[in-house]
Image (cartoon, rainbow, N blue to C red):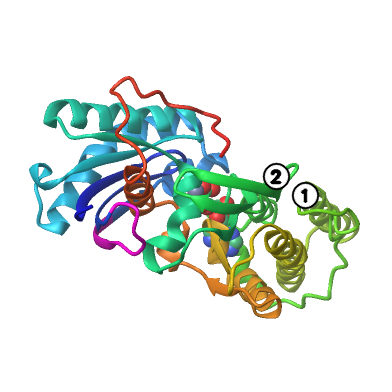
Amino acid sequence: MDARIILGLESSCDDTAAALIRARPGQPVAEILAARVEGQDALHAAFGGVVPEIAARAHAERLDRVTEAALRDAGLTLGAVDAIAVTAGPGLIGGVLSGVMFAKGLAAATGKPLYGVNHLAGHALTPRLTEPVAFPYLALLVSGGHCQFLIVEGPERFTRLGGTIDDAPGEAFDKIAKLLGLGQPGGPRVEAEARAGDPAAFDLPRPLLDRPGCDLSFSGLKTAVRRARDKRVAARGGITRAERADLCVSFQAAVAETLAEKTHRACAAFRGRHAVGTPVLAVAGGVAANGAIRAALRRVAEHEGFAWVAPPLALCTDNGAMIAFAAAEAMAARGPDALDLSARPRWPL
Ligand code: KG4
Ligand code: ZN
């Protein structure tokens, strides 16, 4: 198939994103022509977390201008776009609906084909957006809402090897940032704070390591951090700057270590199913932006003989290009969605 220009729209959490890519359906490596992301940290800051109603309204207000800005950056008009792709779930339903309704409006007005994309598929396919990675490959998706090991077998074919049984690691980073008064977004703040800390200062648990398989758990770890902090506060009325850094780095090390151990197991499970010369381990999702976690996973890949693929940071967090690219992948296998495409709060791969 010839190259297509695809508009990708994302609004399933707290980023309003629009991107234009040029891709050959079914082929890896696309050209990103423009990519705009408007975050909402300032809108939710006072509440210590994303407020779904506020997020949905902000998406509805911003999708228009973010899309216009992306088209302007690319020097294109809507007429030059071959297809419109939008996150149709999973996510906060108000935000997903804002995006789906906006995309339907564009598709109805222009007659362009519409593709509803699974947000998780968008993250899981991102490695192919920038690198010539072949199917099947092993992907670890680690974000604020999700954590799972997937064998990516095709554009819309995934096998789940395991995942978190409670919180996602990004959610744990965000809650710990809140607990320690670091503000949001939690992940980058905890990572920055961790630089000054000693990872052996606090003895935090490594949940589920004693259990076979690739499942993970982060809620007990989060509670352990809270207890350690509360103990200091009860004894001395507060924690010092140095203790806060120690807690951040000890937590980050515990997350990195558990993810690394489960990644070893996922690599073995992948090898058990697929005889591939040099298999690929790819990471995606916002938590993959964390330097310590990235380094730990990279070491696992090297040790297991897997090629390591980590998309650039801007493509690890929520963005429109991954949604456009997932549609390009789907396009090789199927036609567009009908205009009655529904928004799905839950949509497992
Ligand atoms: O993929 P993403 O943009 O949104 C979804 O959850 O789908 O991921 C956002 C999550 C947030 O929880 C954020 O705190 C976390 O990724 N994150 C990080 C870092 N940067 C973002 N976590 C740890 N270290 C980071 N540097
Ligand atoms: Zn995401």
User: Can residue 198 be seen here?
Assistant: yes
Q: Would you place residue 212 above or below residue 340 in this image?
A: below
Identity of the residue drawn at 47% across and 34% down = 89
Relative horizontal placement of residue 181, taking residue 289 as reference (left or right)? right
- Residue 239 is situated, as x and y percent measured from the top left of the image, at 78, 63
Which residue matches tag 2? 167
Q: Position of residue 301 (x, y in %)?
A: 64, 74
Q: Secondary structure at mark 2?
A: loop
- Left or right of residue 327: residue 262: right
Classify 347 as above or below 230.
above
In front here: 132 or 260? 132
Q: Where in the figure is residue 339, as x and y percent of width and height? A: 28, 23
Residue positioned most to the top: 340
Label 1 crowd bin: few (<14), some (14–19), many (20+), radius 10 Å: many
Kind of residue sitting beneath label 1: Ser
Q: Are marks 1 and 2 in contact (CB under 8 Å)?
A: yes
Which residues are drawn in magenta? Answer: 25-35
Instruction: Relative to 177, say whether 85 is above or below.
Output: above
The answer, for residue 186, to whether it is visible in the render is: no
